[in-house]
Image (cartoon, helix red, strand yellow):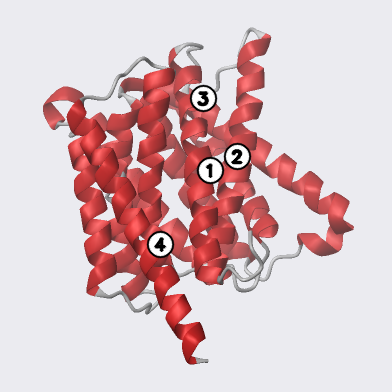
C-alpha cells in the first residue's frame, strides 16, 4: 500500500481483501458438509482448531511465551465463543441452503454493526453512511430473497450468525487497541474450538447428526479441513487489522462485497447461475462500498489540505 494512504482508507482496502477470502472458507465448508457428508460441527471445530495451531506456531516463532500474553484474555475468549456459535449456525445453514441465499440473510449484519457502533462505541454515524449501508442491504435483497416457506427454521440460522458477528466485530474494535491481531485470533480460536468441542459432546449425547464428530475416511476432506482453517485464519486476521485502522461504521458497507464473492463461487463451484436481478443487486452492493470509499478518501484529502 502507498505510504501516504490514510488509516481509514487502508482499513477499507484490508476489509475488501478479507471479504474476498472468507466466502472461499464458506464454500469449502459447504462442500465438506454436502459432498463429504461431514457434520457442520466437525467442520466448525476443525476451522477453529487449525486457526489456533497456526496462530500459536507463528506467535511462538516470533517471540515465545512473552508474545502470547493478552491484556483482554476474557474478552478475546468470548469473541471466540461468539464466533464458535456463529460458525455452527452458518455451516449448518449452508449445508441445506444455497450459499448466496444464506449470505443474503446474513447481510442484515452490516446494518446492525453500523447501529451498534453508534450505540456502543459512540462513533459518529452520519446519514450518508447509514444510507450507503441501507442501499447495500437493499442490494442483497435483490440478489436473493430466501423465504420461510422454502427453508423453514433453517432460514433463521444466518440471522443468528449476523447478530453474533456484529457483536464480535464491535469487540474487535474495542480490544484491538491493546492486543495484536495475531494474539486476538489465537484466543478467539481457543474460545471457538472449546465451544464447538462442547457442542459435539452434546451432539453425541443427544444424537443430533449435524452436531456430532465425524472423521473423514479419505485424504481429500482432511486437506479441505486444513484449508478451511487456513482461510479462516487469514481472513479474520485481515478483519481484525481492518478494525484497528478504521471505525466500524466506515467498514460496514464493505462487508457487502462478501456476497458478491459468494455469488461468483456459487456460479463456479455449485453451478448456481445468477439471474439479471442478482447482477443488479451486485452492482448496487458494489456501488454502496465504492461510495463510502470515495467519500472517506475525499474527506481525508480535505483534512490534509487544511493542515
Disc 1 and disc 2 in contact, CB within 8 angstroms: yes
- Is label 3 in a helix, a strand or a loop? helix
Mark 4, residues whose alpha carbon is within 10 Å: few (<14), some, or many (≥20)?
A: some
Sequence-earlier tag: 1 or 2 = 2
Alpha carbon separation for disc pair 1 and 3: 21 Å
For residue 110, what is the image quadrant?
Answer: bottom left
Mark 3, residues whose alpha carbon is within 10 Å: few (<14), some, or many (≥20)?
A: many
- Is label 1 in a helix, a strand or a loop? helix
Sequence-earlier tag: 1 or 3 = 3
| Mark toward the viewer: 2 or 3 | 3
Quick check: 274 above or below 195? above
Q: Is residue 84 left or right of residue 250?
A: right
Q: Which mark is residue 195?
A: 1
How far across and how far down the image is residue 257, in percent? 39, 45
Alpha carbon separation for disc pair 1 and 2: 10 Å
Alpha carbon separation for disc pair 4 and 2: 32 Å
Identify the residue under disc 3.
28
Residue at the left extreme? 149
| Mark toward the viewer: 4 or 3 | 4
Identify the residue under disc 4.
293
Amino acid at each position: 500500500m502507498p505510504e501516504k494512504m490514510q488509516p481509514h482508507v487502508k482499513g477499507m482496502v484490508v476489509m475488501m481483501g478479507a471479504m474476498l477470502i472468507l466466502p472461499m472458507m464458506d464454500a469449502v465448508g459447504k462442500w465438506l458438509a454436502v459432498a463429504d457428508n461431514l457434520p457442520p460441527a466437525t467442520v466448525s471445530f476443525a476451522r477453529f482448531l487449525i486457526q489456533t495451531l497456526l496462530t500459536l506456531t507463528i506467535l511462538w516463532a516470533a517471540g515465545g511465551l512473552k508474545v502470547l500474553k493478552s491484556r483482554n484474555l476474557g474478552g478475546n475468549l468470548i469473541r471466540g465463543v461468539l464466533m464458535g456459535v456463529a460458525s455452527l449456525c452458518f455451516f449448518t445453514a449452508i449445508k441445506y441452503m444455497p450459499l448466496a441465499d444464506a449470505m443474503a440473510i446474513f447481510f442484515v449484519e452490516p446494518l446492525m454493526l453500523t447501529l451498534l457502533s453508534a450505540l456502543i462505541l459512540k462513533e459518529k454515524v452520519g446519514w450518508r453512511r447509514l444510507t450507503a449501508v441501507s442501499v447495500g442491504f437493499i442490494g442483497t435483497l435483490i440478489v436473493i430473497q430466501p423465504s420461510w416457506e422454502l427453508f423453514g427454521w433453517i432460514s433463521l440460522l444466518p440471522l443468528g450468525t449476523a447478530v453474533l458477528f456484529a457483536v464480535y466485530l464491535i469487540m474487535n474494535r474495542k480490544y484491538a487497541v491493546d492486543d495484536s491481531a495475531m494474539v486476538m485470533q489465537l484466543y478467539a480460536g481457543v474460545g471457538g474450538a472449546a465451544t464447538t468441542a462442547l457442542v459435539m459432546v452434546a451432539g453425541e449425547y443427544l444424537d443430533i447428526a449435524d452436531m456430532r464428530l465425524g472423521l473423514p475416511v479419505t485424504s481429500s476432506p482432511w486437506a479441505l479441513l486444513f484449508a478451511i482453517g487456513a482461510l479462516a485464519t487469514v481472513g479474520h486476521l485481515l478483519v481484525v487489522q481492518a478494525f484497528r485502522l478504521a471505525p466500524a461504521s466506515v467498514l460496514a458497507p464493505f462487508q457487502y462485497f462478501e456476497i458478491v464473492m459468494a455469488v461468483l463461487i456459487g456460479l463456479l463451484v455449485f453451478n448456481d447461475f445468477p439471474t439479471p436481478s442478482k447482477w443488479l443487486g451486485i452492482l448496487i452492493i458494489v456501488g454502496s462500498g465504492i461510495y463510502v470509499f470515495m467519500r472517506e478518501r475525499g474527506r481525508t484529502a480535505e483534512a490534509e489540505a487544511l493542515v
